[in-house]
Image (cartoon, coloured by chain):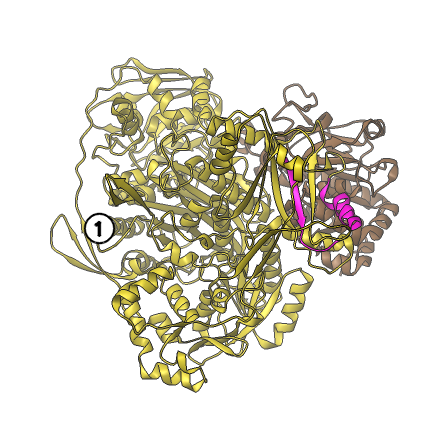
Chain colours: A yellow, B brown
């Protein structure tokens, strides 16, 4: 890798090698960043500084005169009203902590500043502006400063930090950091000799972070020993030393193409499966058998599915000449190491998936879902992991910046907490895009590169960021995971590129498009080259952020904000010209052809010359074993509390139920003016919707419903019922706002995102985890077919574990911490007329409250059991009666509700999820700013007759519906044949009063007080 | 063929601006022709601006809000389009900026243009007191003493704000006196119950801590105007965050009241400029 020079420049008179401009708030101006840091330092570190103020530092890495520096300060960096230029030594601090990016890490602000400086100085020079933040801390000692730096302020993977005491600053000031990235002057191609022992093969894979198994290494070894391999290389004049050996780049390309991240080996491999020691059966690929096949069987029924599981995103025909592209992704490993960078890259990456679907869809809605450790965790942090609250902060900030800055509204977002995610957070990001069905007479959902088309790279430049990101995602995390696996997204570079691409698309300037994400050019060009059967590419032409990259690094770098296009030769000029006018770089770097070879050069040097057939199909499928063993947990044994007021209040305050509004408000959910049922509804606009509804363009009344289901806790009992439950949850959330089940005209589809916990598939534990995966997939296939809801896109992330080395006596043992098997099931539906949408808030006193669906004593892995267990013994009760789904009955209920929505007789609908009926009733009532009276004896229920069970059971397929009294008959007629009952009334009392089975009130609580408890937990956190 | 009797609205796009489509839709609803043109194409042919009566600077994250929100966008207007902009203003045409567009107008000096100097920054829009970007709906009231043509006839409005840097700070007493005495404060945040102006500390009604509760400012002529809230965020009645409740009460408006802003501009231009 390149050399990094980091030195203090020597300021001299006149023009200097680099200049610093320090910008401070004027005296008396507020400093929100400083104030919020003061609070965080107090809350998380128990350090109470007298004050923390911030300043911004711009370092101009070019020779400029003092006048020029003054002009930049006055016209660009300093706000004349609130800010002033400062000297480092200006008073008011004991310490200065200066934090900037490490060399080579994307500094988006610096990049903007450099081009803005050119405008002001009227020059074309490269200013190489770097930015840093100074924290001026008063009233704490060195030890506190070190803790702030290490535990809150600085991520050493990507940031540089310098700490100065007041004395140091006064004595010698702060010098500008000047850095250059450099490497070998002449890039080189390295040799990888695989004619070695098995042990050495394993060593090569491990040292190179290639994530290739011994079997795979041997397949490659064999390939390099074939005559054909040698002969073909001779023919193109490759040097002798490469004739039966790979180049460094080739091994990287193969590793990347073959990575779990790209190839989904576990989902495509052969499995021998058995349940509870019973007979073994063969499963020929989970993906083909349980995910793709059910959708294929439904295709004939649903003409609106245009593309499922083949493009970067699923594509459906939304009617009136518009298509929807939809995709959800995870970005877990990077978010664990650098939460901000990992998360922003996650959301921008899935935006690009949609931009690369068909001829390119324009993102119109974003979705997030996070699984975190408890943000209030107070135990020891082991193995170099970041505190859960810090991960959470960074992830939120990343997706907030990525989404808001791209002008894409947030349609739905949720958080789930469990300490097992403390080591490995899950960061789901989804995007929905829109495109015309026909563009200049071409169907927009099909695309194909043709031989002779130019390979054009568009967008950001290539740096060392993200090298090995995809192979690394396929690895278990350790504290030694590679630094360069982290990228920082630059939303604005991407937004500018995205606008350009849509413009170019509508002018018909390219023939095919795909995202440059995991695996970089190697992956994007390699995939597109399958259309024509080969390509040539010259890496010397690829624009770089800085010199010093080796060819293999250019090829596999995962630098963000790039797309690859196939452009017919006659249109190359026009495309490149338009790009230049839009401030976007577009560079021809090669040509697609039918040579059968993936041929990469650097100038005259061949960097890679691989057979396309071998690259994409040369490896045997993985063989795995999977075993399911039924687990029996202790059945908790406690009596129902007589009164449930306190229980309900504490349940509402629990992390998985409480309000998440503080964070959610920071996501723009309204740009584009599409949102109809917003993430928050109710009288005070502060209670979460079951699902959201957005129109697809201004002026339209056609909307898209966005809903999801997730409940990893059920996996502790049975991943089959976990899966059935989350499918049902997502569908019934959609139904609650007014969605209809799918038909040949009614659109409803789903996306599946598996996050599993396989450290090694071949271990005993691995087999059991595979067994859980098989059961989950079976449920997915069965319930998708039973509900008739097709999956059109999906993704998996299989290795969400953290390997921790612990000392046991004088021995070091490796401990593996796994996330619970987690499935995000996302449902979307078309709503023909959004004015029919229903929200969850009770609307008016006098309205009738109905409980729809059957309640059972299904409290296995419920929030109530967790709460009672934690209260009694410090750990959750789990139990065994996990909620199940009767799809047949559920479908009847959902169809009937759909008809009721159509007639407009429903005032509100809310589906119980975590926390059950009790929580749902409270939410519906306080959202309406009203009161509710309910009788548990009237709730359709089958069980041992406990008030607490009826209140907190998490049985599926249920709703609380309110109906205006004058429409009672109509509603009941429509619902006939389904399970439902009138259970109470909405009133204006501001109280929730629930009568227990004995006839006495078990809840008689002030709703404002309940709401306050529900709001308080994460307010400001 | 363009209709010569129609009001024409120019909406620059690019560099991270992102409200151009709904804004164009709004002006079309108000009866105008609206064209979205990349700002680089306007810079290349500044004469383009002669064809238009209204310049609408839209919201978004121009240049990522790097350095300060709207700052780089402002510099681009100032350094690359300074002359045609001044001409546009001198010809009595209309300019409106929303959110990021407002920030750019403030930072380039187009607003509040104290003493009709359209190139000197005297006010700023800085970080919200809450220290974060927030998306929430706010109640607004107009200043009856203002000559702003964009808010004329509008008493109250309810619109979303979506920004992290929307707090108005005024350079000094002179500027303050000047904009108050000439009625340049066209729009205030307000407290729904009392109808009073929501002052600096009245969070969340004043969502950012703006001085004097300022939500929108006009130039001395009243033709040039900027506001932080998004009028184009409330064009459909179903954009209202509690529309299902209004529907039940029977108070759902026929169209989103935000459109009143666009209708004002288009009406003025139709009467005086076409």
The location of residue A1019, given as percent across then percent down, is 49, 27
Q: Is residue A792 above or below residue A507?
A: above
Q: Which residue is mark 1?
A: A771
Query: What is the secondary structure assignment of the residue under circle 1?
Result: helix
The magenta-colored residue range is A54-78
The location of residue A254, given as percent across then percent down, is 38, 68
Residue at the front extreme?
Answer: A171
Residue A621 in view, yes or no: no
The location of residue A731, given as percent across then percent down, is 37, 43
Q: Is residue A955 above or below residue A233?
A: above
Using a 10 Å C-alpha cutoff, classify the residue at mark 1 as few (fewer than 14 neighbours), some (14 to 19) or many (20 or more): many
Residue A817 included in the magenta stretch of the image: no
Residue nearest the observer in this picture, A297 or A391: A391
Q: Residue at x 25, y 55 (%)?
A: A761
Instruction: Decide if residue A835 is on the left or right side of residue A254.
Output: right
Residue at the left extreme?
Answer: A278
Residue A490 in view, yes or no: yes
Residue A62 included in the magenta stretch of the image: yes
Residue nearest the observer in this picture, A976 or A261: A261
């Amino acid at each position: 890798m390149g050399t990094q020079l980091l030195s203090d420049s020597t300021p001299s008179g006149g023009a200097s090698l680099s200049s610093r401009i320090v910008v401070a708030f004027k005296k008396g101006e507020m400093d929100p960043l400083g104030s919020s840091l003061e609070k965080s330092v107090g809350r998380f570190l128990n350090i109470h500084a007298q004050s923390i103020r911030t300043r911004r530092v711009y370092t101009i890495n070019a020779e400029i005169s003092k006048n020029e520096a003054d002009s930049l300060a006055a016209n660009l960096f300093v706000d004349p009203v609130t800010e002033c230029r400062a000297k480092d030594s200006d008073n008011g601090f004991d310490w200065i902590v200066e934090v900037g990016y490490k060399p080579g890490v994307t500094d988006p602000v610096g990049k903007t500043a450099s081009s803005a400086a050119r405008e002001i100085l009227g020059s074309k020079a490269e200013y190489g502006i770097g930015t840093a933040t100074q924290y001026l801390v008063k009233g704490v000692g060195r030890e506190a400063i070190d803790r702030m730096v290490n535990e809150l302020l600085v991520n050493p993977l990507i940031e540089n930090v310098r700490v100065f005491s007041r004395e140091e600053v006064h004595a010698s000031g702060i010098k500008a950091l000047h850095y250059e990235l450099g490497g070998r002057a002449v890039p080189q191609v390295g040799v990888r000799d695989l004619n070695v022992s098995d042990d050495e093969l394993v060593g090569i894979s491990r040292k190179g972070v290639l994530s290739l198994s011994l079997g795979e290494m041997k397949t490659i070894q064999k390939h390099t020993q074939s005559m054909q391999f040698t002969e073909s290389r001779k023919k193109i004049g490759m040097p002798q030393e490469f004739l039966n050996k790979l180049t460094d780049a080739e091994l990287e390309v193969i590793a990347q193409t073959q990575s779990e991240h790209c190839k989904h080996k576990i989902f495509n491999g052969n499995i021998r499966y058995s349940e509870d020691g019973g007979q073994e059966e063969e499963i020929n690929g989970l993906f083909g058998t349980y995910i793709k096949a059910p959708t294929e069987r439904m295709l004939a029924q649903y003409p609106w599915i245009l593309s499922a599981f083949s493009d970067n995103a699923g594509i459906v025909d939304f009617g009136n000449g518009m298509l929807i592209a939809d995709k959800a992704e995870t970005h877990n490993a990077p978010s664990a190491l650098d939460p901000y960078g990992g998360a922003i890259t996650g959301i921008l990456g899935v935006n690009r998936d949609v931009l690369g679907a068909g001829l390119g869809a324009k993102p119109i809605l974003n979705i997030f879902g996070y699984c975190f450790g408890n943000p209030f965790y107070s135990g020891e942090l082991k193995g170099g992991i970041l505190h859960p609250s810090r991960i959470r902060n960074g992830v939120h900030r990343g997706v907030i910046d990525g989404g808001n800055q791209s002008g894409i509204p947030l349609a739905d977002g949720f958080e789930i907490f469990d300490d097992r995610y403390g080591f490995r957070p899950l960061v789901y990001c989804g995007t929905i895009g829109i495109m015309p069905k026909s563009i200049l007479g071409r169907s927009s959902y099909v695309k194909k590169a043709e031989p002779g088309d130019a390979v054009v790279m568009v967008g950001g430049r290539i740096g060392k960021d993200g090298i090995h990101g995809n192979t690394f995602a396929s690895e278990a995390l350790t504290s030694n995971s590679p630094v360069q696996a982290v990228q920082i997204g630059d939303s604005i570079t991407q937004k500018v590129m995205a606008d350009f691409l849509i413009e170019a698309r509508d002018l018909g300037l390219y023939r095919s498009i795909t995202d440059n994400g995991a695996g970089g050019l190697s992956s994007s060009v390699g995939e597109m080259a399958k259309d024509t059967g080969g390509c040539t590419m010259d890496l010397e032409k690829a624009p770089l952020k800085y010199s010093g990259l080796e060819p293999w690094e250019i090829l596999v770098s995962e630098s963000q904000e790039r797309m690859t296009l196939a452009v017919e030769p006659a249109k190359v000029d026009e495309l490149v010209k338009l790009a230049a006018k839009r401030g976007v770089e577009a560079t021809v770097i090669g040509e697609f052809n039918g040579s059968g070879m993936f041929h990469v050069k650097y100038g005259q040097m061949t960097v890679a010359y691989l057979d396309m057939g071998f690259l994409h199909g040369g490896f045997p499928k993985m063989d795995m074993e999977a075993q399911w063993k039924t687990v029996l947990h202790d059945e908790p044994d406690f009596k129902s509390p007589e009164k449930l007021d306190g229980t309900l209040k504490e349940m509402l305050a629990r992390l998985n139920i409480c309000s998440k509004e503080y964070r959610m408000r920071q996501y723009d959910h309204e740009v584009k003016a599409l949102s109809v049922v917003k993430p928050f509804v109710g009288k005070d606009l502060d209670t979460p919707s079951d699902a959201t509804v957005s129109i697809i363009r201004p002026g339209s009344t056609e909307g898209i419903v966005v809903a999801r289901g997730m409940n990893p806790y059920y996996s502790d009992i049975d991943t089959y019922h976990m899966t059935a439950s989350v499918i049902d949850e997502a569908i019934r959330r959609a139904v609650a706002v007014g969605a209809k089940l799918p038909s040949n005209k009614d659109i409803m589809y789903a996306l599946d995102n598996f996050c599993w916990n396989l450290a090694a598939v071949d271990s005993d534990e691995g087999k059991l985890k595979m067994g859980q995966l098989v059961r989950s997939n079976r449920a997915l296939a069965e319930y998708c077919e039973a509900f008739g809801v097709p999956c059109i896109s999906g993704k998996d992330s299989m290795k969400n574990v953290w390997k921790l080395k612990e000392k046991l006596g004088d021995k070091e043992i490796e401990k593996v911490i796994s996330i619970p098997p987690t499935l995000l099931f996302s449902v979307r539906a078309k709503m023909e007329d959004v004015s029919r949408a229903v929200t969850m808030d009770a609307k008016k006193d006098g309205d009738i409250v109905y409980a729809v669906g059957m309640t059972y004593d299904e409290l296995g892995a419920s929030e109530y059991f967790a709460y009672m267990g934690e209260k009694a013994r410090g750990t959750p009760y789990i139990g065994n009666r996990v909620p199940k789904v009767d799809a047949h009955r559920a479908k009847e209920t959902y169809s009937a509700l759909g008809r009721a929505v159509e007639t407009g007789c429903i005032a509100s609908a809310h589906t119980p999820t975590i926390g059950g009926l009790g929580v749902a009733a409270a939410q519906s009532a306080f959202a309406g700013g009203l009161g509710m009276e309910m009788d548990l004896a009237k709730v359709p229920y089958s069980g041992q007759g406990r008030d607490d069970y009826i209140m907190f059971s998490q049985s599926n397929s249920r709703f609380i519906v309110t109906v205006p009294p004058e429409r009672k008959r109509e509603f009941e007629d429509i619902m006939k044949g389904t399970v439902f009952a009138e259970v109470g009334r909405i009133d204006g009392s501001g109280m929730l009063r629930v009568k227990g089975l004995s006839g006495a009130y078990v809840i008689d609580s002030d709703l404002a007080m309940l709401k306050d408890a529900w709001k308080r937990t994460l307010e400001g956190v | 063929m363009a209709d010569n009797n129609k009001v024409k609205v120019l909406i620059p796009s690019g560099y991270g601006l992102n409200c151009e489509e709904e804004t164009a839709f709004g002006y079309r609803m108000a009866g105008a022709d609206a064209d979205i043109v990349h700002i680089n194409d306007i810079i290349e042919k500044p004469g383009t601006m002669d064809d238009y009566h209204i310049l609408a600077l839209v919201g978004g994250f121009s240049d990522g809000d790097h350095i300060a929100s709207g700052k780089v966008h402002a510099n681009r207007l100032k350094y690359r389009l300074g002359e045609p902009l001044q001409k546009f203003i001198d010809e009595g045409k209309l300019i409106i900026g929303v959110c990021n567009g407002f920030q750019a107008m403030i930072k380039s000096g187009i607003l509040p243009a104290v003493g009709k100097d359209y190139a000197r920054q005297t006010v700023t829009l800085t970080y919200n007191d809450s220290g974060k970007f927030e998306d929430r709906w706010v109640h607004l009231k107009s200043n009856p003493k203002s000559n702003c043509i964009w808010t004329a006839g509008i008493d109250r409005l309810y619109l979303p704000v979506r920004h992290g840097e929307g707090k108005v700070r005024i350079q000094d007493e002179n500027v303050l006196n000047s904009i108050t005495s000439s009625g340049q404060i066209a729009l205030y945040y307000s407290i729904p119950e009392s109808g009073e102006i929501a002052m600096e500390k009245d969070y969340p009604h004043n969502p950012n801590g703006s001085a004097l509760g300022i939500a929108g400012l006009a130039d001395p002529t009243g033709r040039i105007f900027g506001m932080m809230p998004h009028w184009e965020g409330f064009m459909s009645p179903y954009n209202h965050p509690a529309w299902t409740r209004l529907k039940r009460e029977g108070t759902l408006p026929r169209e989103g009241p935000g459109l009143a802003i666009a209708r004002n501009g288009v009406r003025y231009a139709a009467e005086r400029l076409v």
